[in-house]
Image (tube, rainbow, N blue to C red):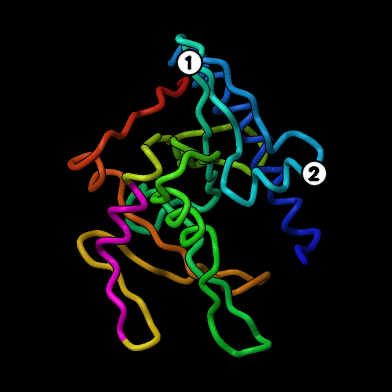
Amino acid sequence: MKDKSFFKRMKLSAQDFEKGLRPTMEKQFGATIYSIEALPRKELVNKLDFVGVDAFIMDQEQEMYGLGSRVNWAWFENEPSFSFRFALWDARINDWTYEREYKRKLQIANRPEKQIFPEWHVESFSKEKGSGQIVWARMGRTKDILNYIDANIVKEGKDYRGINGVSIQEPKSKKERRLVVSVPAKTLEKICEVKEIILKD
């Protein structure tokens, strides 16, 4: 079961998205964005969150797409990157569990049947939690990002490591032990579509 700190983080992340990203993206792309994270935690909202849909974006042709969003509050250690939760430490079995965001989204992205999925993934950095002060943001096609990461992860025994720009790291946290997989935006720009979100000065 998710603790109170998880829902607090989600609330602050939603505030950053609503204040800093949503109005900027709507203006830049001439689109309408319907945020999911800002809604009360009902059953449908939880299901959408499980498959990684944080919002829906409707473009000028009235076509609607799922949107995933990750707001970072600690600046990237190396360079700005797209990232996903890769594993969570389970003290009951004294080992990592990998049925997390990255694996779920990768499986859904490559299923042949149509289904709800975040076609676009937005990665951003906020200067202060919940402030909406976004200072960096990029948007890429989720499937392209996931497939590049998948092609550049090497399994060594029970462990995994990344190559060609992909990295798997354990962030410092007092709340929980987790692994995050990431790839620099500059690396992805060379092989797939990555859009810069133009932010206010």
> Position of 171 compared to 15: left or right?
left
What's drawn in magenta, residue-wise? Answer: 145-156
**Residue 120 higher or lower than 153, as above or below:** above
Q: Which mark is residue 41?
A: 2
Which residue is rendered at x = 45% and y = 24% of the image? 199
The kind of residue on which mark 1 rests is Asp
**Residue 148 higher or lower than 39, as above or below:** below
The kind of residue on which mark 2 rests is Arg
Residue 110: % across, % down: 39, 51
Quarter of the C terminus within the rendering: top left
Residue carrying label 1: 59
Quarter of the N terminus within the rendering: bottom right
Which residue is rendered at x = 42% and y = 48% of the image? 109
Which residue is rendered at x = 54% and y = 24% of the image? 57
Q: Who is closer to the viewer here, 117 or 73?
A: 117
What is the quadrant of residue 128 in the picture? top right
